[in-house]
Image: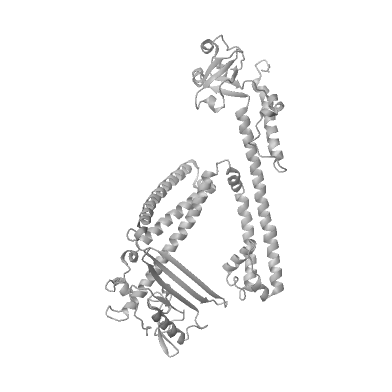
Amino acid sequence: AVVPSAPSSNGSHSSVFALQPAMPNSTASSGGNTYNFSKPETELGSHRLLGGFVFAFGTSRESAMASLDYAREGGWFSKNSASMVFDWVTFNGNVDRFTYNMVSFSLLGTGEFIKTSRSTSFPLNIAKGGGFNMVTRTTAIGLFVVYVSFVLGYIGSYILSMNRNFKKAPTLGHFLRDFFSDVWNVSDLVSLVLSAVSIINVLAFVLQTFRGSYSFSIDSNIKYQVPNTVVKAFSMLKDVDPGRDLQDDWYIFSQFETLESMYRTCLTIAALNSFFISIKIVKYVGSLSAVRPFSSTLNKGKTRNFYFAIIMLMGLLGFSFLFHIIFGRSAPGFSTWPSTILTIFNWIIGEYDLTHVLAKDFWTALVCFAAFMVCFYFIAVNMFLATMVNTYSATVGDIDIAATRTRVDNDKMLRKIEYPSKERFKKDIELAINEKGDFIVKSVAPHGDAHKEGVAKDHVISKINRSKDAWKRETVELTWTEGIEEDDRNGGLVTVFIKDSGKSFGGRFRKKEEVDHSHEVRATAKNFWRVQGAVSRIYTEEKSRRKPILSDDDGSDDE
């Protein structure tokens, strides 16, 4: 018979069950007592409807102790019980939140005794109640609406981006290969999927029928009514039957188990989504000069790290099988294959306790542990670090060379600009004549061709259309009207050569005080050749290209 107790249908109580084979008459006897067995999935009472013998602990200390003594007298606390689960629900009216608590004890086939516990607090009221937390809940609802809007907008933007890339690709295979070869596209896709799943889970929790209809009350006249469909599905007793209150409590427990699982899933998905959103932020901050060496290192080393991780994983799997087979039945942490992987992974990061494995077989444990640590801790981990350091060093060197190239391009003494017409040239640059009689730049148009090439005020016009002097006149106005012409030999273009005033290539190397090296990386044994070699090589290239550019038709040079 069901253990006698009289808890409030909306009260707090707990249940415990031991998984046992179902009996034909759904009852069992132990110590002279008879107990009901709840069949899996079809009868209420057991934890997550897994089946078992259920004991109600009531809502008071006295009733709980009575049920506990009743189970102890029946001999349930023995090695014959494969699993026991204690679960109970509490309510805190100060914060308007329910807390589902669960403690389980399981005896595995390997002989290991597993103890687990979990406690999850969650609200049933979403848009009402909560006392002083109502402001927080209202704000959360508003932010959730904003979040959904942003996610939908980003999904639309992502689809448009995929569509543009798909139209450019010759085939579907090329599109998939090119689009998803970019790690950021993959990260964005995973983040969007997790965002969508997170939103769906939150909506599923909010729209759950029991959550919206159940309310806690200490008034015995206010009682939650179990839906008729549920009454028929589980063949529950009639309302007038004394055992119906207990069945109502069991149904409420099953619903709290469901809500707790849904809420925990929401938190897990949200946590994963937060991680990928953080990864996405790296995409946008990676362009910052302070972050670029690290983001570029990760980007350049991703393929190498991927294959190296596969090699380490294969070795980790091999050692996990070794330790699980040898120590699986005698040492905690090796009873299951996943727990073995976690245990030896902790060894890699320096957290280990060999007490149990050494007690099992000292020399075998010592040899296996030493082999594992040599392969992973001393070889694999250091190879991985060396790979990353080498990639970082190469990345910093590339950044040094690119920065030097940019600086040389910005500071180069000669700039060549081709204009499609004289009018375009006149709109882009305003000319003037200095005291030496040279034609100089008085001003440049913002965002024009000259501005993009780094032309600035007082820069000297060296040549126009391969000529140094033929285009010059006494005044700027005459120069524009009579001197400067479009070059028919060059497709009607106007080719202008502009050089910095008072600078030469030789002066760059002779006058070291004019060169600002404050932004350069300090030379070390690793980057000396990159820093110095980059500067020397780039300026040598610029100097070798200078003569052909500056040469006139007759082979003469500016200098």
Q: Coloured how?
A: one colour
**Residue 505 rendering spot, x and y as whole percentages:** 68, 25
- For this orientation, the residue located farthest to the top is 474
In the image, what residue occupies the spot 40% across and 56% down? Answer: 199
**Residue 360 rendering spot, x and y as whole percentages:** 66, 76
Left/right placement of residue 391 relative to residue 265 reads right
Choose between 158 and 409: the one closer to the eye.
Answer: 409
Occupied quadrant, residue 24: bottom left
Q: Is residue 63 above or below residue 211?
A: below
Left/right placement of residue 510 relative to residue 148 reads right
Left/right placement of residue 191 relative to residue 246 reads right
In the image, what residue occupies the spot 58% across and 40% down? Answer: 289
In the image, what residue occupies the spot 46% across and 45% down? Answer: 162
**Residue 339 rendering spot, x and y as whole percentages:** 58, 68
Number of labels in the image equals 0
Image quadrant in which the N terminus is located: bottom left
Res. 387 in view: yes
Choose between 305 and 363: the one closer to the eye.
Answer: 363
Image quadrant in which the C terminus is located: top right
**Residue 334 rendering spot, x and y as whole percentages:** 60, 71
Q: Is residue 496 above or below residue 533?
A: above
Occupied quadrant, residue 346: bottom right
Occupied quadrant, residue 257: bottom left
Q: Is residue 170 above or below residue 343?
A: above
Left/right placement of residue 556 relative to residue 249 reads right
Res. 38 in view: no
